[in-house]
Image (tube, helix red, strand yellow):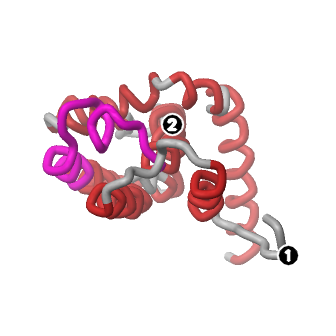
Amino acid sequence: MDDDTILCESLVVSEYVVEEFGGSLIPSSPKDRATMRLFTELCGSNFAYFSLLRAKEDKLEAALKTFQEGLVATNAFLKHHSSGGPFLLGEQFTLAEVSVAPFVQRACIILPAFTSNTNVVVNPRQICDELGLDHLKAWIEAVMARPSVIATGVPEEDLVKGTKRMLERFAEMEKKFD
């Protein structure tokens, strides 16, 4: 930026970069921009997988139900708003996908890795298949296959290692406060 303004929050920074330097990530139509922003907000809560990772065994079913309900809502949004292509706005890859892709990637990698030792293995893609969430599944597959998402994604092994360390730290902190 040209002055001393400091931006934080990845979505705000992303919007600034696109608006400052151009590009096609923000649609020209006000309606499409509103749809993009609403979808980003929706996904912020619907791909909130961290509560599943931290859920105790007796709370896992409830956390899974909440996660599944979020996926169902996201599928309904995509079904209603997307048209003629794999992304939210059809063929156009938008800032919505850019913003949400890291969370989708993490949910698809981390949840199966960390729930494999529980009674309930959580895999977002499998949930989509089981619940018939075809629009969401197609969107996830298209986003995850996008070359820019692949190139900027964190390797699976690093995600799993980093998450393991983070969960261990949370467990240590919880012991201190018990």
Secondary structure state at the residue bearing disc 2: helix
Residue 127 seen in this snapshot: no
Queried whether the magenta region covers residue 140, the answer comes back as no
In the picture, measured across the screen, residue 56 lies left or right of residue 22, that is: left
Q: Residue at x 53, y 56 (%)?
A: 54
The residue where tag 1 is placed is: 4
Residue 37, position as x, y percentages in the image: 39, 61
Q: Residue at x 85, y 75 (%)?
A: 4
> What is the three-letter code of the residue carrying label 1?
Asp
Residue extending furthest right?
4
> What is the three-letter code of the residue carrying label 2?
Gln
**Quarter of the figure with the N terminus:** bottom right
Q: Is residue 31 above or below residue 119?
A: below
Q: Residue at x 19, y 32 (%)?
A: 84
**Quarter of the figure with the C terminus:** bottom right
Residue 145 lies in quadrant:
top left
Residue 60, position as x, y percentages in the image: 38, 54
Secondary structure state at the residue bearing disc 1: loop
Residue 32, position as x, y percentages in the image: 30, 55
Residue 153 lies in quadrant:
top right
Residue 132 seen in this snapshot: yes
User: Dot 1: within a 10 Å radius of its alpha carbon, few (fewer than 14), some, or many (20 or more) residues?
Assistant: few
Residue 160, position as x, y percentages in the image: 64, 34
Q: Which residues are magenta?
A: 73-95
* Numbered mark located on residue 105 in the image: 2
Q: Quick one: 145 or 5, which is closer to the camera?
A: 5
Mark 2 vs mark 1, CA separation in Å: 34 Å
Q: Is residue 3 above or below residue 11?
A: below
Q: Quick one: 15 or 75, which is closer to the camera?
A: 15
In the picture, measured across the screen, residue 10 lies left or right of residue 162, that is: left
